[in-house]
Amino acid sequence: MKDVIHFYKTYDLNEVRKFYGDVLNLKLYRDQGKCLIFDMDGHGKIGFCTHHPKNMAESTCITFVYERRVDVERMHNHLKSRSAEVSKPKLNDEFKIYHFYAKDPDGHTLEFQTFLN
């Protein structure tokens, strides 16, 4: 695994950009249009998205980032072999990622992905 990103729901990406970029001085790692990902100075990454579900309990997502697509597929096969609840891996052209989702025992959303660019 290369990195972990914690995603949170936001209603205003411009305010998020100002606060995390200008006030906290975090470097913008990726701007995906609907999501902003900030580098926390070598201590992981934090992301904010406008497209998360309206239910705040479902608004967080822990994303595990891998170097290659094959690593994502290996993790999918591993979780599936352990009877975990997983979605099918797929390409996401909008965010230029290859990914799938799973749930942990408490129902938290986990995403396993690789960036394609």
Image (cartoon, rainbow, N blue to C red):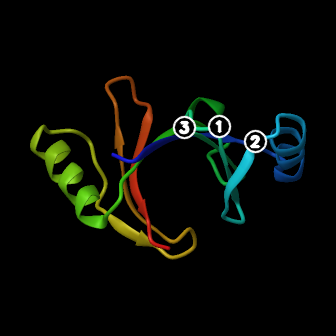
Compared across the picture, whether 5 is left or right of 112 comes to right
Please give the name of the residue rendered at 87% of the width and 39% of the height, measured from the top-left corner.
19
Q: Earlier in the sequence, mark 1 or mark 2?
A: 2
Circle 3: residue type: Gly
- Residue 21 position within the rendered picture, expressed as x and y whole percent measured from the top left: 83, 45
Circle 2: residue type: Leu
**How far apart are the two marked residues, 1 and 2, measured between alpha carbons?**
6 Å
**How far apart are the two marked residues, 3 and 2, measured between alpha carbons?**
11 Å
Q: Give the structural element (helix, strand or loop) at label 3.
A: loop
Q: Earlier in the sequence, mark 3 or mark 2?
A: 2
Mark 1 and mark 2 residues within 8 Å of each other at the beta carbon: yes
- Which residue position is annotated with label 3? 44
Residue pushed farthest left? Answer: 81
- The image quarter containing residue 39 is top right
Mark 1 and mark 3 residues within 8 Å of each other at the beta carbon: yes
**How far apart are the two marked residues, 1 and 3, measured between alpha carbons?**
6 Å
Quadrant of the frame with the N terminus: top left
- Which residue position is annotated with label 1? 40
Q: Give the structural element (helix, strand or loop) at label 2.
A: loop
- Which residue position is annotated with label 2? 26
User: Relative to residue 106, is residue 13 depicted above or below?
Assistant: below
Please give the name of the residue rendered at 65% of the width and 32% of the height, measured from the top-left corner.
56
Please give the name of the residue rendered at 40% of the width and 30% of the height, measured from the top-left corner.
107
> How would you rate the neighbour count of disc 3 (Cα within 10 Å): few for under 14, some for 14-19, many for 20 or more?
few
